[in-house]
Image (cartoon, rainbow, N blue to C red):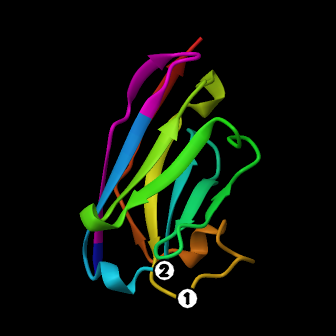
């Protein structure tokens, strides 16, 4: 089992920045990748970014590319999401996820791949 706890959400204005953190505990050695997803009210869960746990390869949704950066600190078992130039459409609950199976470049953006999920942290961007 892997436990995930997100933090860092809040209420900001358009153009501001936020950094989300996701602290992992438990059987983290079995994790191949971690990702951030987001879900706005009435919308489906949406992939935001992913990072492989060992190699540090990163992947982004087109909607956040160039504005968001995912990174990891293996010593702290923590993944970060630096969000810059925030827009009102970025408003959502942001969820951290961990993949307990071998990494797949063809499906890293699919929520079904991820075995473990955090509770989420709310990000609200006002215009």
State the residue position of label 1: 102
Q: Quadrant of residue 127?
A: top right
On screen, 105 above or below 24?
below
Mark 1, secondary structure of its residue: loop
Q: Which residue is mark 2?
A: 32
Front residue of 1 and 40 = 1
Where residue 42 appears, x then y in whole percent? 61, 41
122 lies above or below 98: above
Which residue is rendered at x = 60% and y = 55% of the image? 49
Q: Give coordinates of residue 87: x percent, y percent.
A: 63, 23
Start-end of magenta stretch: 3-18
Q: Residue at x 58, y 17 (%)?
A: 15
> Is residue 98 or residue 53 the one in the foreground?
53
Res 86 → quadrant: top right
> Residue 99 magenta-drawn?
no
Along the horizontal axis of the image, is 44 left or right of 106?
Answer: left
Viewer-nearest residue: 45 or 50: 50
SS at badge 2: loop
């Amino acid at each position: 089992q892997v436990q995930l706890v997100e933090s860092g959400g809040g209420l900001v204005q358009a153009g501001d920045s936020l950094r989300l953190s996701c602290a992992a505990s438990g059987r983290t050695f079995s994790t191949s990748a971690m990702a951030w997803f987001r879900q706005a009210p009435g919308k489906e869960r949406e992939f935001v970014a992913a990072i492989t746990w060992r190699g540090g390869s990163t992947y982004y949704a087109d909607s956040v590319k160039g504005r968001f950066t995912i990174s990891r600190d293996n010593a702290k078992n923590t993944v970060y999401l630096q969000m810059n130039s925030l827009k009102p459409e970025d408003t959502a609950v942001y969820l951290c996820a961990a993949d307990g199976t071998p990494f797949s470049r063809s499906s890293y953006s699919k929520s079904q791949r991820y075995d473990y999920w955090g509770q989420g942290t709310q990000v609200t961007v006002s215009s």
